[in-house]
Amino acid sequence: MLRPYVSQTNRRIRVKNQTRRRITRSTTAALVAAVVALAPGVARADDASNDPTSHTTFGYVPVDAQGQAQEAAVEEQVREVEGFNPGETLIPQATPTESRSLQAATDGSYTVVSSWTDNLGKPTVARRGNGTTWGLTKVQTKHNATLSMVQKTTKFPRPGGRTTDGSSIVYKTDAIEWECWLGVCNAKRSMSVKVVIENARLSDGLQKGLITAYCEGVTVCPQWVINVTG
Amino acid sequence: MSSTEQFLAALEARWRKSRGSALIPSEIVLESAVAHGDIAEVLVTRNGVHFGLRVRIPVADVVNPMEPESGTPEHWAIWEVVVPLIEEIETDAEGRIRPDSHGVIWV
């Protein structure tokens, strides 16, 4: 039975190397290293769980006074955002006559691309827009934003991150990349995302909806933010 | 009050009301809003950096039939000035646009 022996030896070498890398990280790390050295059986059992893991969240994750989050809370937020399905809310249909006149008048700018509900259950829409000053096409081309990013920002704003002001609704939330170890997570990088909705009703009975969406501080949203919103 | 003055007054009122909110971050200060003909010239500062926006003041009573609320001074102030200006400032206009000879970054 040579194979199990080799496998076990390789595992021990791996654990030893991992121990070397981590020993300077913290007192906790040193304690774990000592346990690993003294009890290989325990090391084998904990091998996978001792590896740092990375998670990226979109939306609010509670943190303590040191800015650290519990890995369980991070994983919960990951699951919640991944499980979000905006669906499609029912949009009142214009009569054929109205539809033709609207189409002629608007040249497609006002076409509703998607509708969903925000974190308070309020119906929200994204229209195609004019490509330069408002709408989905503009935010896609100018800021690399996606419809999913817009929808999830309105669905998962940070606490106090949904404000109404005049005819506007502004949503703000955070994309955060975490490194977690032993159940505790530290933020490695983060990005604040902002979405501005015009709440005024248009002649088709729906709000104007998405005006702009962007990552604060940069012209183009980085790909890791786009990826986390799916 | 002329039509132009109404639009500029609406902008100043919106700025007073919304500054410190998510719409207008508190560090962005309205320095001036003046009209040159039918063009409004709006100057703001953020942390000592000057930004400017030039935008047309609409002719009164011209309303987009699809947007019944458009064309009013209040609508213009928020959707033609505040939101586009703040968007440019918050998406690194400073890194993209060279300031003019007076140190103003025109967005």
Image (tube, coloured by chain):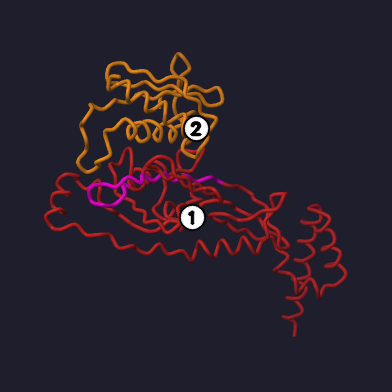
Chain colours: A red, B orange
Q: Residue at x 40, y 51 (%)?
A: A146
User: In terms of depth relative to the viewer, which is nearer, B16 or A57?
Assistant: B16
Q: Position of residue A135 (x, y in %)?
A: 33, 45
Q: Is mark 1 on a helix, strand or loop?
A: helix
Asked if residue A187 lies left or right of residue A168, the reply is: right
User: In terms of depth relative to the viewer, which is nearer, A124 or A14?
Assistant: A124
Q: Mark 1 points at which residue?
A: A227
Q: Which residue is drawn at 43% across and 21% down?
A: B43
- Asked if A133 appears above or below A174 in the picture, the reply is above
- Asked if B49 appears above or below A210 in the picture, the reply is above
User: In terms of depth relative to the viewer, which is nearer, A132 or A117?
Assistant: A117
What's the mark number on residue A123?
A: none
Asked if residue A123 lies left or right of residue A8, the reply is: left
Image quarter for residue B37? top left
Identify which amino acid the numbered label 2 is placed on.
Answer: Arg
Q: Residue at x 37, y 18 (%)?
A: B34
Tell me if mark 1 has few (under 14), some (14-19) or many (20+) residues whose alpha carbon lies within 10 angstroms of its own. few
Q: Which chain is mark 1 on?
A: A
What's the mark number on residue B19?
A: 2
Q: Where is residue B39 in the image (x, y as percent from the top left)?
A: 30, 21
Identify which amino acid the numbered label 1 is placed on.
Answer: Asn
Q: What are the residue bounds of the magenta stretch?
A: A191-208
